[in-house]
Image (cartoon, coloured by chain):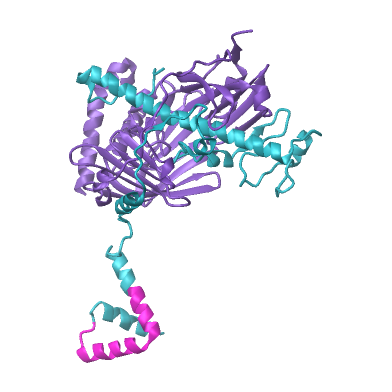
Amino acid sequence: MTDRSHEQVSALLDNAVADAREREQQLDNLLSDTEAQQAWGRYALMGRIMKDEAATRMPVDISAAVAAQLAQEPQQDKVVQGRFGARAVPQMLQRWLRPAGSVAIAAGVALVAVLTVQQSQPVMPEESMEPAFATTPIGGRSPVSYNTVLQSNEPTQAELAQQRRLLQFYLLDHNNQLQLSLQAQQLNEQSQNQQQPATAEEQEPRLPNDN
Amino acid sequence: MTTNLLSSSLLGLLLFTAAPVLAQTSPASELQPTAPVSAAEQRFNEMAQALRELNFEATLVRSTGNRLEPMTWLHGNYEDGPEVELIVMLNGPDRRIVRLGDDTSYYFQPMDDSYTLRSDVTYGLLPAAFYQNFAALKPHYQVSAAERGVRITGRETKFLRVLSRDNDRYHYGLWIDNESGMLLKMQMTTPQGEVLEQLQLTTFVEREAIPISLSDLRGIQRPPRLHEIRNRVAPQFGAKPTYLPAGFELLRSNHRYLAATRLPTDHFLYSDGLTEVSVYVTESEAQSLPELGIQGPESIYNTNLQNYAVTVVGKLPLATLQRIAENMALVSE
C-alpha cells in the first residue's frame, strides 16, 4: 500500500474528501482492499486514542460480581472463634487468617537470602523456590561457600520440608497476631472514644501503649 | 487547571497554618534548615489524608523478590461519611478485601475461610502508620523530601523518604502524586538500599464521587466476625526479651500453640508504630530448628538459648532480629 493511498484512507476517515465522486471511489477502494481496511481500523483507533475516547476498560463492575458470587454462597452465620487452642482442626487453622492483601506467607519467605548460617544448614524456606543450597541436589546453582558449611549429619529431605513448614507457621502466626492486634487496638480506641465522647472525632495515634 | 490552582493554594494554606504548630514544638525550628523537613512531613500527612479521602480507581502491582501480584484497588467515601475500599487480587485464587468504615472483610474461596475484622485499615497493603500523621512516627523515623520525583504512572510526583533514625529498621521510599497527594509508588529497602518490596500503581483515576462499582457494596453479605478468646495465658517459659530497638513497645504477650502446630509457645509482639516484631520462645527439643537467619520483607531468625528455641520474626533487618534473639533473659532457673 502506497503512501498516497494511506493518505486517502486518512482523509476519508476525517471526512476531508470534498469531492463526492472522489469520496465514492475511495470508499470503493477501501471496501475492496483489505490492507486499506486495516489501515482504516488503525487510523480510527489512533484517532480515538488521541481524542481520548478509546474505550477504557477501567470501570469493571466488580461489586456486581462480588454480590452475585456472594448470593450463590451458602449462608454463613456462625461466628468464628479465634482458634488458638486445641479444639482447632489443623487443616482449617492453616488457612485461617491467611493474610489476603498481604505478605502472602510464602512470598515472605520466597525471596529470602540466607545471610547467616551459624552451624547447621540453612533451611530452604519455600517449596517452589529454586534453592541455592547444596543440601538439595535439585537446585541449579549451588554456591561453593555453602558446601563448606555442610556437615556429615545433614538433614534429610523430609526434615528440611518439616523445617520449612515450621518456618511458614511462624510467619503465619506473626501475621495472624498482627491482624488481631490491629483489631484489638481499634476496639480499644473505640471504647476509649465512647468514654470520652468529646474526642470521638479525633484520629488518635493508633499503635502506642496497648497491652 | 483550576484544581491545580486550588490544591496549590490549599497547600500554601496548610503550610501557613502548620508553621505556628511547628514553632510551638521546638523554638529552633524557625531556622532555615528545618524548613524542608516540615514540608516533607506535611506531604506525608497529605498522603495519609489522601488515602482516606480520595475517590479513586487504581490498579497496582506488588513485587516481592521475583513474585508479582497485580490487584485492583478502589476507594471512595459515601456521601454520608463512611469510607469504602475494595481490593481484588488479579492473579491466582480469587481473594478480595472489602473495607466499609471500621469493618474489613477478607473473602477467600472457598468462603469458609473468609472473615471480618474490626479495623479501619486494610491489613497487608500498606503499613497502618501511612494512614496517620507522621507525628506518631517522629521519635524513631525521619522523613525527607526530594525536590521532585520522577514520573510515575504518567504523573508528576514528589519523592519522600522515610528513614529510621538508627538504621535498625527498614526504610521506605514514597512517590506522591503532585496533584492529588496519592501514593503512587512505594519501595521498602534495607538500610543498605536493597529493595525488598515494591508497590507500583499502574493506573490511577481520581473521581469526583465514589466509584460507581463501590456504591452498592454496602449491601453485600459480610463473612463472620473474628473474635479472640478473652482469657489469655501469660508466658510460661520465663525467657523474655531484654533488648529491642528504641521505640518498640509490647502490644501483647501470651502462651499458646503456634499457629496450626502443637508447639507450646510463648509469644511477645512489639511495635514501633510502623513495623512489628514477634518473639517466640519454645522448648528446643520440640522445635528442632537449626540456627538460621533469613532476611527478606519478613525476616526470621532462630537460635537456641539453653533449653529454649528463640525465634524472632518481623519486617526488620536480620541483624536487628539477631540482636533481639541474643539478648533474651532467663528469669527462672
Query: Which of these two is toward me, B176 or A199?
Result: A199
In the visual, does B140 lie left or right of A195? right
Residue at 38% over, 25% down: A184
Q: Is residue B53 left or right of residue B317?
A: left
Q: What is the quadrant of the N terminus of chain A in the image?
A: bottom left
The image quarter containing residue A5 is bottom left
User: Which colour represents chain A?
Assistant: cyan
Q: Examine the residues drawn in magenta and state their main secondary structure.
A: helix
At x 21%, y 43%, the residue is B5
Q: Would you place residue A125 above or below residue A69 in this image?
A: above
Residue B205 versus residue B313 in the image, above or below? below
- Location of residue A55 in the rendering, given as x and y in whole percent from the top left corner: 30, 64
What is the magenta range?
A17-43
Q: Is residue B60 magenta?
A: no
Instruction: Reply above or below: A158 against B70.
Output: above
Q: Position of residue B173 (x, y in %)?
A: 44, 37
Q: Is residue B248 visible?
A: no
Residue A42 coordinates in the image, percent (x, y) = 36, 74
State how many labels appear: 0
Tell me, yes or no, whether the highlighted magenta stretch contains residue A28: yes
Q: Quadrant of residue B251?
A: top left
Picture quadrant where residue B146 is located? top left
Q: Nearer the viewer, residue A115 or B152?
A: A115
Chain B drawn colour: purple
Task: For residue A72, say whether it is visible.
Answer: yes
- The residue positioned farthest toward the top in the image shown: B333
Who is closer to the viewer here, A9 or A133? A133
From the top left corner, tell me how far across and down residue B316 is, in percent.
53, 29
Q: Which residue is more in the foreground, B152 or A133? A: A133
